[in-house]
Each structure stands twice: as C-alpha cells, then as structure tokens.
Image: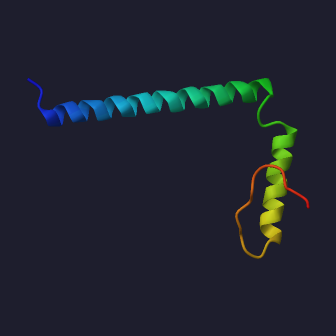
Amino acid sequence: MITEHQEVARHRVAEQIKAAEVRAQRKEHREVLRAEGEAGGPRHELAGVLRRLADRLEPQPRHRRTGLSVVR
C-alpha cells in the first residue's frame, strides 16, 4: 500500500517530468524555426543590437515597455 507521502512524491515527480518534456518540445520547436530562418532573423538581431545600445546610453536601467507607444 502506498502512503500519502509516497503518493504526493509520485505526483511531484510526474509534474516535473511533464514540465521537462514541455521545455524540451519548446526548445526543439525554437531550433526548428531557427533552422528554417523564421526566428532569429535579421530583424531579431537588429532589435538585440538596438537594445544593447540603449542600455549603454541610459544612465539608469529602467523598465522597457512592450508594444506600441501612444502619442498624444
């Protein structure tokens, strides 16, 4: 007979295995996209360069908002 502690441990291990499988699938998907040239293209590289440049120019790091800026 399985104790409650063993049952909880078994569920935790099952959740960890499932999470690891999901991470592996995501990583594999990203690698496939990168190999096909859909992710990590020139626009992505340019965005990284511009972010690093902005980080050097700003005296204090601050939160970068995502999305479109609103001009009034």
Q: Quadrant of residue 28?
A: top right
**Farthest residue in the bottom direction?**
59
Quadrant of the rendering where the N terminus is positioned? top left
Q: How is the image coloured?
A: rainbow
Q: Residue at x 80, y 71 (%)?
A: 58
**Farthest residue in the right direction?**
72
Q: Residue at x 14, y 34 (%)?
A: 4
Q: Residue at x 17, y 33 (%)?
A: 6
- Taking depth in this image into account, of 35 and 15 the one nearest to the observer is 15
Q: Estimate the x, y position of residue 38 in percent, counting from the top left.
A: 79, 28
Position above or below: 67 against 22: below
Lateral position of residue 68 relative to residue 3, left or right:
right
Q: Quadrant of residue 52?
A: bottom right
Q: Estimate the x, y position of residue 41 in percent, counting from the top left.
A: 83, 36
Q: Estimate the x, y position of residue 51 in percent, counting from the top left.
A: 80, 57
Quadrant of the rendering where the C terminus is positioned? bottom right
Q: Estimate the x, y position of residue 15 in percent, counting from the top left.
A: 37, 32
Lateral position of residue 19 relative to residue 38, left or right:
left
